[in-house]
Amino acid sequence: MGLNLLPHDLIKIKLDDFFSDSDIPSWVIDSLKRAPLVIVRRGILDGKIPVGVRGVRREQRFPGFISSNIITGENVISPRSLVNDTWKNLPDERLKLPAFKALPKIATLLEGYQWGIGGSAGFELASGQPTAKMTSDLDLIWYENRHLSHAESVKLLKSLNQFGVHADFQVVHGQKGFSLEEFANNTSDTILIKTANGPKLSSDPWTEIEKDKKILD
């Protein structure tokens, strides 16, 4: 279909579009009825798109699939599409949460970056459901277009974490990605890279994530 799906993208679906190799818990059905959105995972195989459903509680995460033939540009919500002041549409009481309160200042800091909002904050902005909490981290997605040194990564993360909420950049390039915080704090010779075929260790994450970029055709 020519649509390039990336990890952390959200897809609007109908309840019957979601399927799994395992028995589907009742909370998954309830969650999809409240917010019919699934989150793209890594590893696209034979027209099956791996996705996840998030529940009310942090431990409620369930993997499954949807068929690629149901996807159009109209039902895909990318984390970067949530950056354009979408938080201004939230009720005042939600804007008091640390994750949302920090976003205007963080957006100013990240001018020039190709970035998006993931995690509970991104899900709430996309779905309208109150999923973020007072203790929620701010998960940011960076669609990598330049390499940062260790010192530059430390400096950037320090600037992002000055607004009363823990923020991290998930560096994404195609189906691969890694945590900028892990890179900045790493004291070993390798760092964990997430790939479509599972995690792997790399001594050069910036070069590694640019190899074998997979595009959904």
Image (spheres, rainbow, N blue to C red):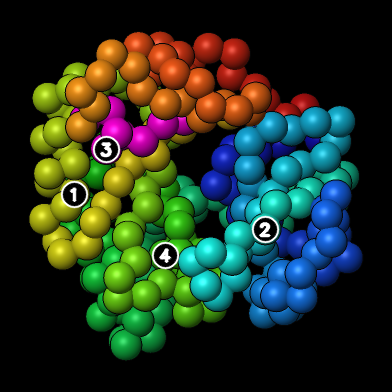
Q: Identify whether 115 is placed above or below 101.
A: above
Q: CA distance from mark 2 to mark 4?
A: 19 Å
Type of amino acid at the residue the image marks with label 4: Ala
Q: CA distance from mark 1 to mark 3?
A: 11 Å
Type of amino acid at the residue the image marks with label 1: Leu
Q: Nearer the viewer, residue 182 or 68?
A: 182
What element does badge 4 sit on? helix
Q: Which residue is mark 2?
A: 62
Q: CA distance from mark 1 to mark 4?
A: 15 Å
Res 113 visible: no
Residue 13: x percent and y percent?
Answer: 77, 62
* Sequence order check, earlier mark of 2 and 4: 2
Res 118 visible: yes
Which numbered disc, 1 or 3, marks the residue closer to the eye?
A: 3
Q: From the viewer's perspective, is 58 left or right of 94?
A: right
Q: Identify whether 213 is placed above or below 217.
A: above
Q: Which residues are magenta?
A: 177-184
Instruction: Give the numbered dot on residue 187.
Output: none
Which numbered disc, 2 or 3, marks the residue closer to the eye?
A: 2
* Sequence order check, earlier mark of 2 and 1: 2
Residue 189: x percent and y percent?
Answer: 28, 13
Q: Nearer the viewer, residue 164 or 199?
A: 199
Whether 89 is among the magenta residues is no
Type of amino acid at the residue the image marks with label 2: Phe
Residue 94: x percent and y percent?
Answer: 35, 81
Q: Which residue is mark 1?
A: 160
Q: Which residue is mark 4?
A: 121
Q: Main secondary structure of the magenta part?
A: helix
